[in-house]
Amino acid sequence: MTLTITTSPIPLTLDANGVVRVGGTRVTLDTVVAVFQQGSTAEEIVYRYPSLKLADVYATIAFYLNNAEAVERYLQQRQQQAQLIRQTNQSRFDPQGLRDRLLARRAEQFPC
């Protein structure tokens, strides 16, 4: 019996928003890398995110380990984008005084 060695495609896809997802799921590369860096095993990651396949998680970890610099750059870009979105949202929806505005609105609707 002869063992045939083949390569499987990397289970990563880039969605319309530029986010890398794992194995056709909604789980992001960011998530898998973060929990892996926190010390989780592939099995623990699949337990946490049951939509993932174990083989896809191992392939994703292997991709990360083989391309650490590129993945880290991608993760930094994602963090910068998230920070920019957070700042934009905070400037559009000022959280200062939110409680006071909500209490005032409530008082208007339900006067004592």
Image: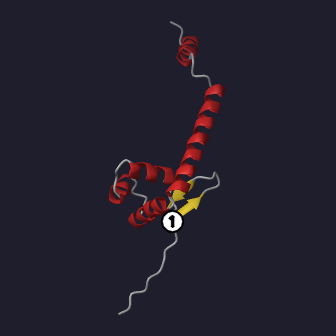
Q: Give the left or right position of residue 103, taking residue 46 as reference.
A: right
Residue 32 drawn at (x, y percent): 44, 53
Residue at coordinates 56% horizontally, 45% vertically from top-left? 76
Task: Give amino acid for label 1.
Answer: Pro
Instruction: Reply above or below: 17 against 96.
Output: below
Badge 1 crowding class, 10 Å Cα cut-off, few under 14, some 14 to 19, many 20 or more, is some
For the N terminus, the image quarter is bottom left
Residue 49, quarter of picture: bottom left
Q: Nearer the viewer, residue 52 or 69?
A: 69
Q: Which residue is mark 1?
A: 11
User: Which residue of the protein is positioned furthest toward the front in this rendering?
Assistant: 69
Q: Nearer the viewer, residue 104 or 7?
A: 7
Residue at coordinates 52% horizontally, 71% vertically from top-left? 9
Q: Give the left or right position of residue 33, taking residue 86 as reference.
A: left
Residue 66 seen by the camera:
yes
**Which element carries disc 1, helix, strand or loop?**
loop
